[in-house]
Image (spheres, rainbow, N blue to C red):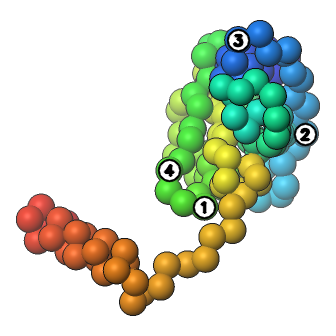
Amino acid sequence: MTTIVAVLATLVMSVGVGAAPATIFLVPCPEETVGAECGHFEALENREVGTGCKIFLNIAMLPALDIDCRSDPLFILTGGSRQAATEAAPLAETAMRRIREYRDIVLVDQRGTGDSNPLDCAPVNADSAYYMLAARLFERERIVFGR
């Protein structure tokens, strides 16, 4: 219960001042994320306006393993186009096992990624100016920094 309250409190603060509290119901995630609980949080697409379209943010939570867990969960947001944080739950389960001993781990798909109102963008054409510029920049970084 404290986990749901902690997740709720953090997400409500992100919605904006004066927003009515919402409840997030977590259920067991699909088989590939054993031990995780999943749910959705409804948020305004544009918080500054205060009204309008709403989107659902997809959430996966790996509950702390110790009953006496700390009240401050670790939130994971991934970056990059189309990258869903919730897809990293199996990795977080193993790589962050020591953190999970005493803290809940909350993975949030940012809007436009995963199951959070996903954007389906066409791949970049390899002949486009954008693609060629990016390729040159990465090549320069590899030469300068030895990466």
- The reply to whether residue 72 is in sight is yes
As measured in the structure, the alpha-carbon distance from the residue carrying label 3 to the one carrying label 4 is 26 Å
Task: Point out residue 16 in the picture as x, y percentages from the top left corner.
Answer: 69, 18
Kindly identify which residue carries mark 3: 17
Quarter where residue 119 is shown: bottom right
Q: Nearer the viewer, residue 142 or 13?
A: 13
Front one among 134 and 143: 134
Pick out the residue farthest to the bottom: 127
Query: In this picture, is 123 found above or below 104?
Result: below
Residue designated by label 1:
82
Q: Which residue is mark 2?
A: 27
Question: Compared with residue 105, is residue 12 higher up or lower down, i.e. above or below?
Answer: above
Q: CA distance from mark 3 to mark 1?
A: 29 Å
Q: Secondary structure at mark 2?
A: strand
Whether pointer 3 and pointer 2 mark residues with C-beta atoms closer than 8 Å, the reply is no
On residue 79, which mark appears?
4
- Pointer 2 or 4: first along the chain: 2
The amino acid beneath tag 1 is Arg
Amino acid on which disc 4 is placed: Gly
Upstream in sequence: badge 3 or badge 4: 3
